[in-house]
Amino acid sequence: MIVCDNYHGMVIVSVTGMNLVRLTRQGIISITGKNFVRLTRHGLQSIRSVWPYTGDRFEVRRQVLKLKWWDDRHLHPPGLLVDHTYEAIKALPGLGLYELRLDDEIGGQRNIRAIFFDPPSNWVPLEQKPMRVIWVLEAFPKKRQDFSRNDLRRFRNSRMLLAQRCYGQ
């Protein structure tokens, strides 16, 4: 947890998890963005296996954190998110699984994809969060255009685990 105090001591900024939180002296908490972005344990391990250097992992994290501005109804221009593009995984229709395309070169890797899960709005989380949660399942450099069967099975199973553990589905 990183805590900073501004010059007058009015606002304390801390980083908890992956979202920016502002605490005022009155105890009011406002989280920036529209979503609470969380990485799964497997997602963190996949990032660690591809990018051995901490700076590269933080760069991937910084890029994925832009999902906090992804709105509920996807009102932004189709397929565009800040400076990245995204697309639903066509082989898994209707499951709320998307790939975020990172165009930057990070740690010598190009064509990076972050797979994320946007739970349906009727799912109620077991542990109450201040905002809806976007789950980042994993990030990796994509070598070919389509996903393998193992990739699709892994994405579907990660979604199923989140549904059971976090939403009681």
Image (cartoon, rainbow, N blue to C red):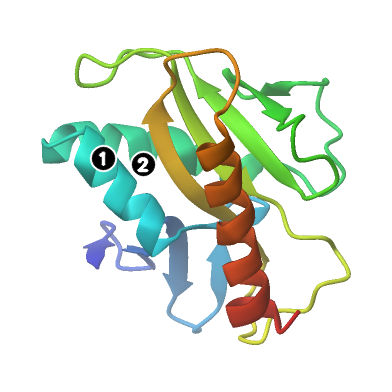
- Counting from the top left corner in percent of width and height, residue 69 is at 64, 41
- Counting from the top left corner in percent of width and height, residue 61 is at 36, 41
Q: Is residue 134 visible?
A: no
User: What amino acid type is highlighted by mark number 1?
Assistant: Phe
The quadrant of the image that shows the C terminus is: bottom right
Disc 1 and disc 2 in contact, CB within 8 angstroms: yes
- Counting from the top left corner in percent of width and height, residue 118 is at 71, 52
For the residue pair 81 and 109, the one nearer the viewer reads as 109
Q: At 55% from the left edge and 62% from the top edge, which residue is drawn?
A: 31
Q: Does residue 15 appear left or right of residue 132 in this picture?
A: left
Q: Is residue 128 above or below residue 72?
A: below
Q: Element under label 1?
A: helix
For the residue pair 92 and 16, the one nearer the viewer reads as 92
Q: Does residue 28 appear left or right of residue 47 in this picture?
A: right
Q: Which of the 4 image quadrants contains residue 80?
A: top right
User: What amino acid type is highlighted by mark number 2?
Assistant: Arg
Q: Is residue 164 above or below residue 108?
A: below
Tell me the tag on residue 151.
Answer: none
Q: At 50% from the left edge and 83% from the top edge, which residue is drawn?
A: 26
Q: Is residue 56 above or below residue 136?
A: above
- Residue under label 2: 61
